Image (cartoon, grey):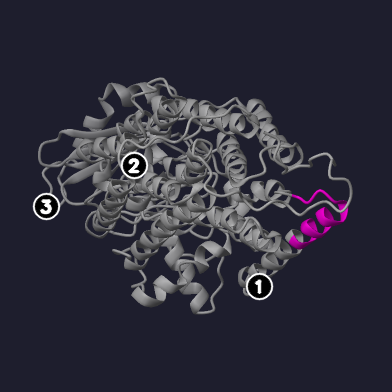
Amino acid sequence: MVACAACPANARAARPGTTTVIAHAATISNGARPAGTAGTAGTAGTAGTTSSAASSSSESPVPVAPSNRPPAGRRLSSDRVLAIASALPKMRAVRAGYRGSYAGAYLKGPGRWQVSFFTANGSQEIGQVIIADASGRVLEQWTGFQVAWTMARGYPGAFGRHVNSLYVWLPMCLLFVLPFVDFRRPFSLLHLDLLALLSFSVSLAFFNHADIYASVPLAYPPLLYLLARMLALLWSGRRRPRLHLLVPAPWLALGLVFLVAFRITLNVTDSNVIDVGYAGVIGAERIVDGKSLYGSYPSDNEHGDTYGPVNYAAYVPFEQIFGWSGTWDDLSAAHAAAIVFDLLAIGLLFLLGRRVRGPTLGLALAYAWAAYPFTLYALESNSDDALVAVLVLATLLVASSPPARGAFAALAGMTKFAPLALVPVLATHRLAPSRRGRALQLLAFATAFAATIALLAILAFAHDSLHTFIQRTIVYQADRGSPFSVWGLYGGLRGVQTAFAGAAIALAVMLAVVPRRGDLVGLAAACAAILIAVQLCIDHWFYLYIPWFFGLAMLALLGVRAVPTAPEPAPEPASGSARSRPLAGAVSS
């Protein structure tokens, strides 16, 4: 919520000695602007978001003093809109729980009024009504968390624009599943896996209709199912049928080319930049100009500095090429960055698949990313979430080299902080059987990881202190609540959430030390399981986070079914007994 400095001018909207809090209806927390508005929003972090002041004065609420005379250019008076809003059963019900609550009237852009209801001391906005000036019709009415969290109101096109339309979403779902359907094995577990990945669509449908009490809990069953499947793949020794493609590989390649062209075209012609992409451009400009990377961000993205320095550095080339006007405009740099991140993810999945099982698997993985509707959802929102996936996938691609693995693990962790949970399992991947070999590999990983963190610290702390960095990132994210998790939506579950967080930590450590599959398929399954476990226990969860683990999950699900075309490189031979016991990271199934 945003403190509105103009509110004291309204006798009913502010009282002496109180602070009036306004949640702008045009502002979408976690980043998006409703289609057709000029409002802006706050930022999304790994743990939650808050709203921020609208950048356009035309959409910012303008207080109107009590009067029975309409303001210039308006049909209704402030007294009339207050009476309309106060008579609504929903507002009467919420006010009944707050003795002494009061209302204030505001002009809300051309042709609309906003009526806000506040607690007696003015510290909390408890209800909000939007009224059409021409007809007196109530357009919107909100209570509870939907007052402050405007992203919970289901504004059309706020995230992903027309990707949410059924004529786009359903064909994408069909294209995603169709190549992997095996009619000879209708009860194949892979069919259920693919449906689980698509089942987030049910939650999204409720989210788009502003039914958060349905959308939030519906996101957890597929997360839990996928977590269980990733863990099962780590220790399953059962032989699996060969990967069956319904269409020939050349057709799949043509489909991939079509989908890539479609995604880029849709991004250029029909996508919006949410606050996350906007923050990347702001940070890139500050790096180039030698300004402080943390603190003093523009008022329309006040908390855009809540990410690691890699996030902002990744936008530098695009900001240099396309520039930035200094306002939340079309942001061509953010569009270009999102497209490149998306293409990199597709390319990395192809390379990983080719390395694991040959070009057919690589093609299948690249196609899966291009056809999956939630990766398109992230692309159309022009967020930085594909960058997280890119750096994690790149870490797997260089997994055979401990120093490279350590460097990329640091880069991924210092983009958004969730991938730091992968460090233990990445450090112990395919350790050598000999004690000396293991020690050298761990030392190489740790040295590269620490050196990369040190270099990034120079970027982060060139103009900021460690205290500022921690306060603007970790502390800010930890202190924000959110209704977009079961923990924030229902409340009173702090003990259960703590238990889930402890389980996620234990899982990250266990997968680092317990023998499991030691190939790239096993590493992908382990990393996907850890990222999903982290997402299960955070305060703020959103659909843009699905791409973080999607590529890993697909590599695990398809990789175990394909027939190897060539053996993977064996770990360093033991200097001692050839029968030494496998350690963490060794193949155990």
Q: Secondary structure at mark 1?
A: helix
- Give the class, few, some or many, for how many residues have Cα within 10 Å of label 3's Cα (few <14, many ≥20): few
- Give the class, few, some or many, for how many residues have Cα within 10 Å of label 1's Cα (few <14, many ≥20): few
Picture residue at 54% right of the left edge, 37% below the top: 560
Residue tagged by mark 1? 458
Question: x, y (%) of residue 503?
Answer: 68, 32
Compare residues 7 and 144 and report the one nearer the observer. 144
Q: Are marks 1 and 3 in contact (CB under 8 Å)?
A: no
Residue tagged by mark 2? 373
What segment is highlighted magenta in the picture? 431-444
Name which quarter of the figure residue 137 lies in. Answer: top left
Tell whether 425 sits left or right of 296.
right
Label 1 or label 3, whichever lies nearer to me, is 1
Picture residue at 85% right of the left edge, 42% below the top: 580
Q: Is residue 567 above or below residue 316?
A: above
Compare residues 226 and 581 and report the one nearer the observer. 581
Where, quadrant-wise, is the C terminus in this rendering?
A: top right
Which mark, by number, is residue 470?
none
Residue tagged by mark 3? 73
Does residue 434 belong to the magenta stretch? yes
Could you tell me the amino acid type at mark 1?
A: Ile
Q: Is residue 329 above or below residue 106?
A: below
